[in-house]
Amino acid sequence: MSKKGWIYTLFFVTLALGFYFVLAQVIPGFTTPKVVPVSFVRPFRFTTQDGQPFTEKEVAGKVYVAEYFFTTCKTICPIMNNHLREVYNEMKDEKDFLILSHTCDPETDSVPQIKKYADSMQVDHRRWIFLTGRKDSLYNTARISYTIDDPNNNLKRIEDQFLHTQFWALVDRNGDVRKIYDGIKYQEVREMIKDAKKLLKE
């Protein structure tokens, strides 16, 4: 290539880089692909293990993982909560990270019942919160907000339903559900911890 050709090539490469730099400055997300959330958390109102009201306002600006379990479960719930204990142990010093464990059996899991269960876990209930409430509200939040159960299940009478899911939802500071994980698969639990740490830095 001639000297003139090199000059033209260098000119156009410099021009292209300059154009790219300008676009990166003026267009949000130009260099980083925009994250499309799975869903977003709608307003809710539940009751904690201490009998206190708990709404979406308590998680505003926080990163948290949401699960559903019930205190008398003998199958997947003990596995999930053992895995959540590992999450808790690793993340308990992160002031902006929470674990929300919602009951899927509020008829059994009254405030005294979940208080007894929560105390047996020997965790800081400011970091790991156990929730009960109205069955329809709990189930709608699982299906519509967290998308960890099929919304079509709402077609049945609420009295006849029983939600039993092993999936967890990871929610970012904006209230967006970023990803769903299988809470009984250890590899996905570790992945969730890693992703939560990244969200805390955003």
Image (cartoon, rainbow, N blue to C red):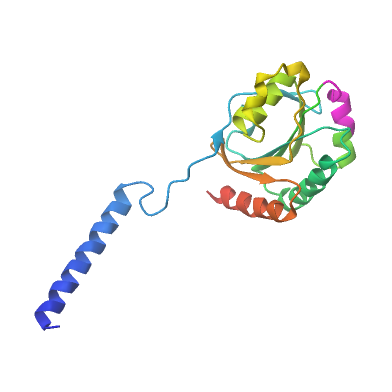
**Is residue 62 left or right of 133 when viewed as pictured?**
left
Note whether residue 55 is visible. Answer: no
State the residue at coordinates (13%, 72%).
8
**Taking 129 as reference, is 144 left or right?**
left
Q: Which residue occupies 23% across, 57% down?
A: 19
**Where residue 61 sits: x, y (%)?**
57, 37
Using the rendered image of the protein, determine whether residue 42 is visible from the camera's viewpoint: yes
Tell me where residue 13 sits by quadrant. Answer: bottom left
The number of numbered badges drawn on the structure is 0
Residue that protrudes farthest toward the left in the picture:
4
Q: Residue at x 47, y 45 (%)?
A: 35
| Residue 54 is one of the magenta-drawn residues | no
Magenta highlight: main SS: helix
Provide residue 109's location: percent of width, then percent of height. 84, 25
User: Of residues 23 and 119, which is closer to you in this image?
Assistant: 23
Q: Quadrant of the N terminus?
A: bottom left
* Residue range (magenta): 107-116
List x then y, in percent, for residue 132.
Answer: 77, 25
Q: Nearer the viewer, residue 76 or 90?
A: 76
On screen, residue 150 versus residue 29, left or right, reads: right
- 4 up-or-down from 161: above or below: below
Say if the magenta span includes residue 111: yes
In the rendering, at what x and y percent does residue 96 appear? Answer: 64, 43
Residue 41 position (above or below residue 25): above
The residue lying furthest to the bottom in this view is 2
Vertical side of 86 occupied by 114: above or below: above
